[in-house]
Image (cartoon, helix red, strand yellow):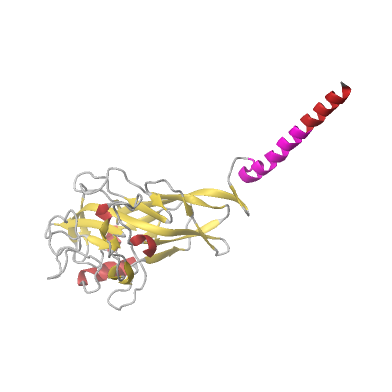
Amino acid sequence: MLLFVKSAAIGVAKSLQWIAMMAIPLTAVLGNDGVALTANGQTQEVSIKFNAKVGKLPFECGRSYVGLGKPATKVTFSDFRFYVSDVALVDSNGKTVPVTLTQDNKWQYQNVALLDFENKSGACANGTVETRNQVIGTVPKGNYQGLQFTLGVPFNLNHADVVTAPSPLNLTSLWWNWLSGYKFLRLDLASQSLGASPKDDQHSHHGQGFPIHLGSTGCQAAEGSQKPASCSNRNRVKLFFTKFDLTKNVIIADVAALVANTNLAANQPNSPPGCMSSPDDGDCAGIMANIGIPFANKPTAGQAFFRVE
Protein backbone atom coordinates (compact mmCIF):
# COMPACT_ATOMS: atom_id res chain seq x y z
CA MET A 1 0.00 0.00 0.00
CA LEU A 2 2.83 2.37 0.89
CA LEU A 3 4.61 1.46 -2.32
CA PHE A 4 1.52 2.41 -4.32
CA VAL A 5 1.21 5.79 -2.60
CA LYS A 6 4.90 6.47 -3.12
CA SER A 7 4.68 5.57 -6.80
CA ALA A 8 1.63 7.78 -7.24
CA ALA A 9 3.41 10.68 -5.56
CA ILE A 10 6.41 10.25 -7.84
CA GLY A 11 4.09 10.18 -10.85
CA VAL A 12 2.40 13.43 -9.79
CA ALA A 13 5.76 15.09 -9.21
CA LYS A 14 6.99 14.11 -12.66
CA SER A 15 3.77 15.41 -14.21
CA LEU A 16 4.17 18.75 -12.47
CA GLN A 17 7.80 18.89 -13.55
CA TRP A 18 6.80 18.20 -17.16
CA ILE A 19 4.14 20.95 -17.05
CA ALA A 20 6.68 23.40 -15.64
CA MET A 21 9.16 22.51 -18.38
CA MET A 22 6.50 23.03 -21.03
CA ALA A 23 5.69 26.47 -19.62
CA ILE A 24 9.26 27.68 -20.08
CA PRO A 25 9.33 27.75 -23.88
CA LEU A 26 5.85 29.30 -23.92
CA THR A 27 7.14 32.21 -21.84
CA ALA A 28 10.18 32.45 -24.07
CA VAL A 29 7.95 32.72 -27.11
CA LEU A 30 5.43 35.19 -25.74
CA GLY A 31 7.42 37.12 -23.16
CA ASN A 32 6.11 38.29 -19.81
CA ASP A 33 3.51 40.54 -21.40
CA GLY A 34 2.49 38.20 -24.21
CA VAL A 35 4.57 40.15 -26.75
CA ALA A 36 5.80 38.02 -29.66
CA LEU A 37 9.52 37.38 -29.71
CA THR A 38 11.98 36.92 -32.53
CA ALA A 39 15.17 34.89 -32.32
CA ASN A 40 16.97 38.03 -31.11
CA GLY A 41 14.26 39.52 -28.90
CA GLN A 42 10.88 41.17 -28.92
CA THR A 43 9.07 42.63 -31.89
CA GLN A 44 6.94 45.75 -31.86
CA GLU A 45 3.91 46.73 -33.87
CA VAL A 46 4.28 49.84 -36.00
CA SER A 47 1.80 52.06 -37.78
CA ILE A 48 3.20 54.37 -40.45
CA LYS A 49 0.75 57.18 -41.06
CA PHE A 50 0.12 58.84 -44.42
CA ASN A 51 -2.02 61.83 -45.31
CA ALA A 52 -3.02 63.56 -48.53
CA LYS A 53 -2.83 67.32 -48.95
CA VAL A 54 -3.08 69.94 -51.64
CA GLY A 55 -0.41 72.31 -50.41
CA LYS A 56 -1.55 73.11 -46.88
CA LEU A 57 -5.16 72.08 -47.49
CA PRO A 58 -6.59 68.58 -46.94
CA PHE A 59 -7.38 66.51 -50.03
CA GLU A 60 -11.14 66.14 -50.59
CA CYS A 61 -13.12 64.57 -53.40
CA GLY A 62 -14.92 67.14 -55.52
CA ARG A 63 -13.45 70.16 -53.77
CA SER A 64 -12.13 72.93 -56.01
CA TYR A 65 -8.55 74.08 -55.49
CA VAL A 66 -7.03 77.18 -57.07
CA GLY A 67 -3.48 77.99 -58.05
CA LEU A 68 -2.29 74.51 -59.04
CA GLY A 69 0.20 73.81 -61.79
CA LYS A 70 1.88 76.22 -64.18
CA PRO A 71 0.10 78.39 -65.17
CA ALA A 72 -2.02 78.47 -62.00
CA THR A 73 -5.22 76.52 -62.61
CA LYS A 74 -8.43 75.75 -60.72
CA VAL A 75 -8.92 71.99 -60.46
CA THR A 76 -11.17 69.35 -58.89
CA PHE A 77 -10.03 65.84 -57.94
CA SER A 78 -11.90 62.59 -58.56
CA ASP A 79 -9.41 59.91 -57.43
CA PHE A 80 -6.25 59.55 -55.35
CA ARG A 81 -4.74 56.16 -54.52
CA PHE A 82 -1.27 54.65 -54.62
CA TYR A 83 0.63 51.46 -53.81
CA VAL A 84 3.76 51.30 -51.67
CA SER A 85 6.05 48.32 -51.17
CA ASP A 86 9.25 47.23 -49.43
CA VAL A 87 8.54 49.44 -46.43
CA ALA A 88 11.46 49.59 -44.00
CA LEU A 89 12.63 51.55 -40.97
CA VAL A 90 16.16 52.78 -40.33
CA ASP A 91 17.55 52.32 -36.83
CA SER A 92 19.91 54.57 -34.88
CA ASN A 93 22.91 52.70 -36.33
CA GLY A 94 21.80 53.36 -39.90
CA LYS A 95 20.67 49.78 -40.45
CA THR A 96 17.65 49.24 -42.70
CA VAL A 97 15.07 46.96 -41.09
CA PRO A 98 12.18 45.68 -43.26
CA VAL A 99 8.68 46.01 -41.86
CA THR A 100 6.77 42.72 -41.90
CA LEU A 101 3.37 43.85 -43.13
CA THR A 102 0.24 42.60 -41.40
CA GLN A 103 -1.61 40.37 -43.86
CA ASP A 104 -5.14 41.73 -43.45
CA ASN A 105 -6.66 40.32 -46.67
CA LYS A 106 -7.73 43.80 -47.70
CA TRP A 107 -5.16 46.60 -47.71
CA GLN A 108 -1.89 44.69 -47.50
CA TYR A 109 -0.55 41.63 -49.30
CA GLN A 110 2.97 40.25 -48.97
CA ASN A 111 5.15 43.39 -49.08
CA VAL A 112 2.60 45.66 -50.83
CA ALA A 113 0.16 48.12 -49.23
CA LEU A 114 -2.52 50.35 -50.73
CA LEU A 115 -3.12 53.92 -49.54
CA ASP A 116 -6.54 55.28 -50.51
CA PHE A 117 -7.65 58.88 -50.00
CA GLU A 118 -10.86 58.96 -52.05
CA ASN A 119 -14.18 57.91 -50.55
CA LYS A 120 -16.44 57.34 -53.57
CA SER A 121 -18.33 60.53 -52.79
CA GLY A 122 -19.16 63.22 -55.33
CA ALA A 123 -16.65 63.26 -58.16
CA CYS A 124 -14.87 60.16 -56.80
CA ALA A 125 -17.59 57.75 -57.99
CA ASN A 126 -14.98 55.45 -59.55
CA GLY A 127 -13.43 54.60 -56.18
CA THR A 128 -14.38 52.86 -52.95
CA VAL A 129 -16.19 54.04 -49.82
CA GLU A 130 -13.47 52.95 -47.41
CA THR A 131 -10.22 54.90 -47.14
CA ARG A 132 -6.79 53.91 -45.88
CA ASN A 133 -4.07 56.17 -44.45
CA GLN A 134 -1.60 53.83 -42.77
CA VAL A 135 0.74 50.90 -43.24
CA ILE A 136 0.72 48.41 -40.36
CA GLY A 137 3.28 45.76 -39.50
CA THR A 138 5.97 44.62 -37.09
CA VAL A 139 9.71 45.13 -36.66
CA PRO A 140 12.23 43.91 -34.10
CA LYS A 141 12.05 46.09 -31.01
CA GLY A 142 14.49 48.96 -31.38
CA ASN A 143 15.16 52.66 -31.78
CA TYR A 144 14.12 53.83 -35.24
CA GLN A 145 14.66 57.25 -36.72
CA GLY A 146 14.25 56.87 -40.49
CA LEU A 147 11.86 55.46 -43.08
CA GLN A 148 12.05 54.18 -46.62
CA PHE A 149 9.55 52.69 -49.04
CA THR A 150 9.03 52.18 -52.75
CA LEU A 151 6.23 53.86 -54.66
CA GLY A 152 4.94 51.03 -56.85
CA VAL A 153 4.25 47.30 -57.04
CA PRO A 154 7.23 44.90 -57.29
CA PHE A 155 7.82 43.29 -60.68
CA ASN A 156 6.97 39.80 -59.43
CA LEU A 157 3.47 40.95 -58.41
CA ASN A 158 2.91 43.70 -60.95
CA HIS A 159 1.84 41.48 -63.83
CA ALA A 160 -0.65 39.24 -62.06
CA ASP A 161 -4.22 38.49 -63.15
CA VAL A 162 -6.33 41.14 -61.44
CA VAL A 163 -9.35 38.81 -61.53
CA THR A 164 -7.70 36.21 -59.30
CA ALA A 165 -5.24 38.42 -57.41
CA PRO A 166 -5.75 38.90 -53.66
CA SER A 167 -6.79 42.27 -52.26
CA PRO A 168 -5.55 45.00 -52.62
CA LEU A 169 -4.27 43.83 -56.02
CA ASN A 170 -7.77 42.95 -57.22
CA LEU A 171 -8.94 46.47 -58.10
CA THR A 172 -9.55 46.77 -61.84
CA SER A 173 -9.58 50.56 -61.52
CA LEU A 174 -5.90 50.34 -60.54
CA TRP A 175 -4.89 47.91 -63.29
CA TRP A 176 -4.02 48.51 -66.93
CA ASN A 177 -3.50 45.06 -68.41
CA TRP A 178 -1.29 41.98 -68.16
CA LEU A 179 1.55 43.69 -69.99
CA SER A 180 1.78 46.98 -68.12
CA GLY A 181 0.38 45.77 -64.82
CA TYR A 182 -0.90 48.07 -62.10
CA LYS A 183 -1.26 51.80 -61.79
CA PHE A 184 1.13 52.49 -58.95
CA LEU A 185 -0.42 55.92 -58.52
CA ARG A 186 -3.83 57.08 -59.67
CA LEU A 187 -4.62 60.78 -59.35
CA ASP A 188 -7.51 62.01 -61.48
CA LEU A 189 -8.33 65.68 -61.79
CA ALA A 190 -10.27 68.09 -63.95
CA SER A 191 -9.75 71.74 -64.77
CA GLN A 192 -12.25 74.17 -66.22
CA SER A 193 -10.44 73.92 -69.54
CA LEU A 194 -10.27 70.12 -69.81
CA GLY A 195 -13.40 69.04 -67.97
CA ALA A 196 -13.74 65.78 -66.07
CA SER A 197 -11.19 62.99 -66.04
CA PRO A 198 -12.24 59.74 -67.71
CA LYS A 199 -13.73 57.11 -65.43
CA ASP A 200 -11.17 54.59 -66.58
CA ASP A 201 -8.66 53.97 -69.34
CA GLN A 202 -6.47 51.38 -70.97
CA HIS A 203 -3.87 53.90 -72.15
CA SER A 204 -6.75 55.45 -74.08
CA HIS A 205 -6.12 58.40 -76.37
CA HIS A 206 -9.62 59.69 -75.79
CA GLY A 207 -11.31 61.44 -72.91
CA GLN A 208 -11.05 64.65 -70.97
CA GLY A 209 -9.46 65.83 -67.78
CA PHE A 210 -5.88 65.34 -66.64
CA PRO A 211 -5.46 61.88 -65.08
CA ILE A 212 -2.05 61.02 -63.69
CA HIS A 213 -1.47 57.26 -63.79
CA LEU A 214 2.01 56.08 -62.85
CA GLY A 215 3.00 52.59 -63.91
CA SER A 216 5.48 50.53 -65.89
CA THR A 217 5.74 51.06 -69.65
CA GLY A 218 7.78 49.55 -72.45
CA CYS A 219 7.00 46.04 -71.22
CA GLN A 220 7.82 43.23 -73.64
CA ALA A 221 5.90 39.96 -73.34
CA ALA A 222 7.88 36.78 -72.86
CA GLU A 223 7.50 34.18 -75.62
CA GLY A 224 4.32 32.17 -75.13
CA SER A 225 3.17 34.29 -72.19
CA GLN A 226 1.06 37.37 -71.60
CA LYS A 227 3.40 38.43 -68.81
CA PRO A 228 6.42 40.52 -69.75
CA ALA A 229 9.98 39.39 -69.29
CA SER A 230 11.02 42.97 -68.56
CA CYS A 231 9.93 46.60 -68.80
CA SER A 232 12.19 49.33 -70.15
CA ASN A 233 10.49 51.92 -67.93
CA ARG A 234 9.72 50.34 -64.58
CA ASN A 235 8.79 53.70 -63.06
CA ARG A 236 9.20 52.65 -59.46
CA VAL A 237 11.01 54.94 -57.07
CA LYS A 238 12.52 54.23 -53.66
CA LEU A 239 12.03 57.08 -51.21
CA PHE A 240 14.21 57.81 -48.17
CA PHE A 241 13.41 59.92 -45.12
CA THR A 242 16.35 60.23 -42.75
CA LYS A 243 14.30 61.75 -39.93
CA PHE A 244 10.98 60.07 -39.20
CA ASP A 245 9.52 59.61 -35.71
CA LEU A 246 6.90 56.85 -35.68
CA THR A 247 5.14 58.42 -32.70
CA LYS A 248 4.89 61.93 -34.13
CA ASN A 249 5.47 62.12 -37.88
CA VAL A 250 3.20 61.60 -40.88
CA ILE A 251 4.16 61.14 -44.54
CA ILE A 252 2.35 63.77 -46.61
CA ALA A 253 1.54 63.11 -50.26
CA ASP A 254 1.24 66.66 -51.60
CA VAL A 255 -0.66 66.92 -54.86
CA ALA A 256 0.20 70.61 -55.27
CA ALA A 257 3.91 69.80 -55.16
CA LEU A 258 3.45 66.93 -57.61
CA VAL A 259 1.86 69.09 -60.32
CA ALA A 260 3.72 72.33 -59.57
CA ASN A 261 5.52 72.39 -62.94
CA THR A 262 2.74 70.97 -65.12
CA ASN A 263 0.18 72.73 -67.30
CA LEU A 264 -3.07 71.17 -66.09
CA ALA A 265 -5.23 73.22 -68.44
CA ALA A 266 -3.88 71.74 -71.67
CA ASN A 267 -2.82 68.42 -73.12
CA GLN A 268 -0.21 67.71 -75.75
CA PRO A 269 -1.75 66.84 -79.14
CA ASN A 270 -1.85 63.20 -80.22
CA SER A 271 -1.18 61.92 -76.71
CA PRO A 272 -3.29 60.30 -74.00
CA PRO A 273 -5.04 62.69 -71.61
CA GLY A 274 -2.86 63.74 -68.72
CA CYS A 275 0.18 61.60 -67.95
CA MET A 276 0.09 57.85 -68.64
CA SER A 277 3.81 57.33 -67.85
CA SER A 278 4.93 57.13 -71.47
CA PRO A 279 8.50 58.39 -71.98
CA ASP A 280 7.46 60.33 -75.09
CA ASP A 281 4.60 62.17 -73.37
CA GLY A 282 5.76 65.69 -72.55
CA ASP A 283 2.88 66.10 -70.10
CA CYS A 284 4.73 63.68 -67.80
CA ALA A 285 8.00 65.63 -67.59
CA GLY A 286 7.25 67.77 -64.54
CA ILE A 287 5.30 65.03 -62.80
CA MET A 288 8.03 62.41 -63.14
CA ALA A 289 10.63 64.90 -61.94
CA ASN A 290 8.63 65.67 -58.80
CA ILE A 291 8.13 61.95 -58.10
CA GLY A 292 11.88 61.45 -58.44
CA ILE A 293 11.93 59.35 -61.62
CA PRO A 294 14.34 60.23 -64.46
CA PHE A 295 12.38 61.09 -67.59
CA ALA A 296 13.34 61.37 -71.27
CA ASN A 297 16.97 60.53 -70.43
CA LYS A 298 17.15 63.45 -68.00
CA PRO A 299 18.24 62.87 -64.40
CA THR A 300 16.10 64.06 -61.53
CA ALA A 301 17.19 66.41 -58.78
CA GLY A 302 15.07 64.59 -56.20
CA GLN A 303 11.41 64.07 -55.38
CA ALA A 304 9.00 66.73 -54.07
CA PHE A 305 5.78 64.69 -53.89
CA PHE A 306 6.26 63.27 -50.37
CA ARG A 307 7.36 65.08 -47.24
CA VAL A 308 7.46 64.49 -43.49
CA GLU A 309 5.29 66.48 -41.10
Kindly indicate the quadrant of the structure image that contains residue 280: bottom left
Q: Position of residue 109 (x, y in %)?
A: 40, 52
Q: Position of residue 303 (x, y in %)?
A: 35, 67
User: 264 or 137, which lies in front?
Assistant: 137
Q: Is residue 81 magenta?
A: no
Q: Position of residue 20 (x, y in %)?
A: 72, 37
Q: Is residue 47 visible?
A: no
> Is 212 left or right of 113, judged from the image as shown?
left
For residue 268, above or below residue 65: below
Residue extending farthest top: 1
For residue 12, above or below residue 170: above
User: 203 or 274, which lies in front?
Assistant: 203
Residue extending farthest right: 2
Q: Most prominent secondary structure in the magenta stretch? A: helix
Residue visible at 62% across and 45% down in the picture: 29
> Is 47 left or right of 51, judged from the image as shown?
right
For residue 217, above or below residue 78: below
The residue range painted magenta reads 14-32
Residue visible at 80% across and 27% down in the picture: 8
